[in-house]
Amino acid sequence: QVAPTAAGDLPPLPHVCTSARACADWGAAACGCGSCGTRAAMSWAIARTGDGQADHKRQRYSGGAELVPALQEQLINVQHVNRKSGLFGPTMLLSGHEGEAFCGEFSPDGRTLATGSFDKTIQLWQVYGECENYGQMKGHGNAILETHWKHDGTQLYTCSADKSVCVWDPETGKRLKKLNGHTAIVNSMQTSRRGVPYLVSGGDDGTTKLWDLRVRRCVHTFEHQYQILAVSFDDPSERIFSGSLDNTVLIYDMRMRDKDPEVLEGHTDSITGLDVSKDGNFLATNAMDNTVRIWDVRPFAGGNNRCLRVLRGATHNFEKNLLRVRWSQKDAMLAAGSADQNVNIWDMRQLQLAYRLPGHTGSVNEICFHPKEPIIASMSSDRLVFMGELAD
């Protein structure tokens, strides 16, 4: 029992840490709750004196604990040392999906992260603060395989194994339109970066469909004999890139839609992800041959071989997941999904692997970059989403 310290005073309530995960994982000294730091400081001070008696020459910490000088310095600066972003912590764990997390993207203003999963839901997370899961959108009948924001952040688009593409209002959480037309799983979709609101989708029916969102219907269908696993527009939305099961990238010209596509050859297995650089000059592809390739897709680039670089590090395995690839906001870095459970990020100035970040216990299916800060989010088959800051 604890005796009252003065007449009428009650003994202090025991502290219950609301950040138990932080205390357990990183130690009480690194927990931001304050009282855990007090307990840590107290135990350190007693341990350092040997006989359990406090050294009265040492400065007292708020709460009455003594601090050794080195610990005092660390405790004061622990939340601010070398921080590069406005994230609540250097790494944030987002849990809530009940199935594998396949896709995700930050909103254009950087305040929201949208993630899609095998559980048929799109989850909306606040990027800053305690990363609250403030919204859940339902409407698909099967796994959600890719999601993207409209360039002004007012709409969200998803494609699913239920053979459809959906348009959502992230403010109300309502589905605005369901685009039907594919006859099999829709593996990938992408929207135009500016100008006319086009959307492109590719599926297991071998078609690449162009949708005009002004009239909310398909305006052209490009046929191919093999499944389409990944699609994207070029920067001005004049060409469509389609990555196929037959190891090739097909380039369709939207101005001459009946013309045979240009073909990029080089991969030796199916292409599962592709992304056009922000300057529009380069295309990155991730394939099941365990390579990421960089292609020169400028319209008038000379030469027959447009493949500029082959990057190794990201791997695929027997799961045959659709592992994506993404450029950072200024094309300084490139991230690719990998079955080795690591987040692989290349420095494109040095053309070498800059980060191999562990933490997931399942295949990392997609990694996306924050539009304004050095923050990444990774979506994995372990049903978890990690959000963390990079060193630069």
Image (cartoon, rainbow, N blue to C red):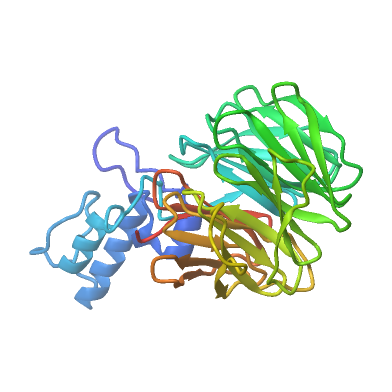
Question: Of residues 208 and 368, which is closer to you in this image?
Answer: 208
Residue 320: x and y in percent read: 78, 66
Residue 140: x and y in percent read: 81, 37
In the image: residue 246, left or right of residue 11: right
The residue under the point 67% across, 58% down is 273
* Position above or below: 46 against 125: below
The residue under the point 84% across, 44% down is 142
- Res 370 visible: yes
The residue under the point 36% across, 51% down is 32
Residue 340: x and y in percent read: 64, 73
In the image: residue 344, left or right of residue 248: left
Question: Of residues 99 and 370, which is closer to you in this image?
Answer: 370
Extreme residue in the left direction: 57
The residue under the point 46% across, 49% down is 279
Which quadrant of the view contains residue 178? top right
* Position above or below: 307 against 379: below
* Position above or below: 114 against 266: above
Residue 350: x and y in percent read: 39, 71
Q: Quadrant of the C terminus?
A: bottom left
* Position above or below: 289 against 111: below
